[in-house]
Amino acid sequence: MDTRFDFNRSDLETPPETEPDRQLYFIDLCRNYIRRKKEQDGKDLTYAVITFGCQMNAHDSEKLRGILDQIGYIETDSEEADLVIYNTCTVRENANQKLYGHLGPLKKKKQENPDMMIGLCGCMMQEPEVIEKIRTSYSYVDIVFGTHNIYKLAELIFRRLTEEKSVIEVLKEAEKTVETLPQKRKYPFKSGVNIMFGCNNFCSYCIVPYVRGRERSRTPEDILEEIKKLAEDGVKEVMLLGQNVNSYGTNFISESEIINVRPAYGFPELLEDVCRIPGIERVRFMTSHPKDLSDRLIEVMKKEPKICKHIHLPVQSGSTGILKKMNRRYSKEQYLLLVDKLRQKMPDISITTDIIVGFPGETEEDFQDTLDVVSKAAYDQAFTFVYSKRTGTPAAAMEDQIPEDVIKDRFDRLLSLIHDISAEQTKRFQGMTKPVLVEEINRQDKNFVTGRLEYNTVVHFPGDASLIGQIVNVKLLEAKGFYFIGEME
Ligand code: SAH
Ligand code: SF4
Ligand code: F3S
């Protein structure tokens, strides 16, 4: 065997069968490889994880970075690193195109650096056509894995090093979740926490259920244990993550784990338990599906001061007819009633949303309904997307796909309305003093820091690095569109 792979492990022949021991074993073997490389070449090997897509993916990347740090790779943000991993998104076609734009130039870099490895993972890799394209047009990619086996990164790297050929391992459905592997957080004071994986909703435009698999909730015990450890480690704010957190607890990960779960334990109960963890000062969650938002959740949000008064409640369209074709399972009226209920119980709440423009068959009248909902719901912020046809989803086969110029015109009108309404909404806090969790030094002016209100609104104010991670009272002097300029009290 090549001396680079002389890992000096007496138990090399027998990797453990059970997790996480198996992965810890492979982490160990890879660590020996990195150490030996350093002895031979006198340099550290570096890595970069490039993330596309949503908060779920960002959190998955923290797990990848945790494993790579343990192995002994040194993190950089340059795509010249010895190991570059792209954690991909495929929710819209343009997310997909982005990856190929990055991959092309890497071929040459790989020729220049024989140590270089390229890894691809995430949602896009769950699509068989993508794997085919990578095999044929990007065969210099070293490791390909999907959304269900990111915990296996060390094992896959080890296989790539020893087998001397590309390693492609994509699973259709999750086999297991591995709870105790390392994670490297972007911020020391806040963290995402998965409470569930996958999605069962099958909105007719959306590819997520196909690439993330069936909905599975983690047990409350595992979630609470993880958050306790985060709190002990200095985390003040957690964001509970799931495609539809309101249906938490419907399907637990495995039968055997259900034993410890209390009957009727759902998302509101989980939130209450999270709020009891000492050290945690702010609790957020994302995403809420309007069809499952219960009165009990609203009650818990209202009474628990640690829960941020912000809800991301994607409406997607304001037209009942389009919502039906989208398989969203609520009407325009039901959505607006929900918004009223939230505002009645929590008058200061901030509501944000996602909207798709140009779903097949969307008429001007349907679009007017969307504008109407935007006016009535008075969103603090709305993320707007041009409908993107995803192969294999029911909407891709629908008639009446909307022409680009019509979509563009509607998109511009929607954006301008949102701009006005959100600016108006943000102003409601002007002149008040509110707690801000300081996140970072301002990117434009190093004499300022940037943080967030519980409403998720960004605030910039004069301050220095010593404030990062602290919650401080800030007077909100001037609303500027989506954000505030303030002054510490
Ligand atoms: N689970 C979340 C959303 C996840 S995807 C929810 O149900 O709200 C994030 C957003 O991407 C969606 O809210 C939707 O607005 C948008 N999106 C999903 N599929 C899309 C498509 N095919 N075209 C355009 N936007 C899409
Ligand atoms: Fe996609 Fe709908 Fe699931 Fe959200 S709830 S991830 S939009 S299928
Ligand atoms: Fe994209 Fe996957 Fe998230 S498709 S939006 S990264 S769940």
Image: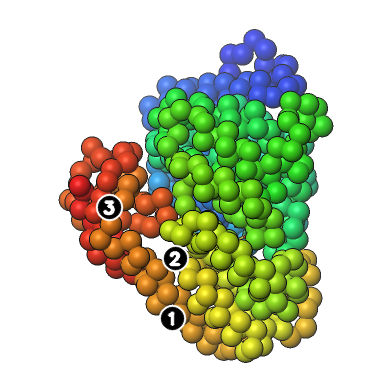
Where does label 3 land, which residue? 433
- The answer to whether the residue labelled 1 contacts the one labelled 3, judged by CB atoms less than 8 Å apart, is no
Q: Give percent across and percent down for residue 255.
A: 82, 32
Q: Is residue 364 left or right of residue 18?
A: left
The amino acid pointed to by label 2 is Asp
Looking at the rendered structure, the kind of residue marked 3 is Thr
Instruction: Kindly give the residue lying farthest to the front in the view shown.
Output: 344
366, above or below 261, in the image: below
Badge 2, how many Cα within 10 Å: few under 14, some, many 20+? many
Q: Are marks 1 and 2 in contact (CB under 8 Å)?
A: no
Mark 2 or mark 3, which has the lower sequence index?
A: 2
Say whether residue 63 is left or right of residue 75. Answer: right
Q: CA distance from mark 2 to mark 3?
A: 18 Å
Q: For mark 1, what is the residue?
A: 416
Choose top left, top right, bottom left or bottom right for residue 421. bottom left
Compared to 84, does 257 lie above or below? above
Residue highlighted by disc 2 = 380
Mark 1 and mark 3: Cα distance apart in space: 29 Å
Give the class, few, some or many, for how many residues have Cα within 10 Å of label 1's Cα (few <14, many ≥20).
few
Q: Which residue occupies the foreground of this view, 463 or 329? A: 329
Precedes in sequence: disc 1 or disc 2:
2
User: Which one is in front, 108 or 79?
Assistant: 79
Task: Using the image as rendered, state which of residue 243 and residue 123 is in the foreground.
Answer: 243
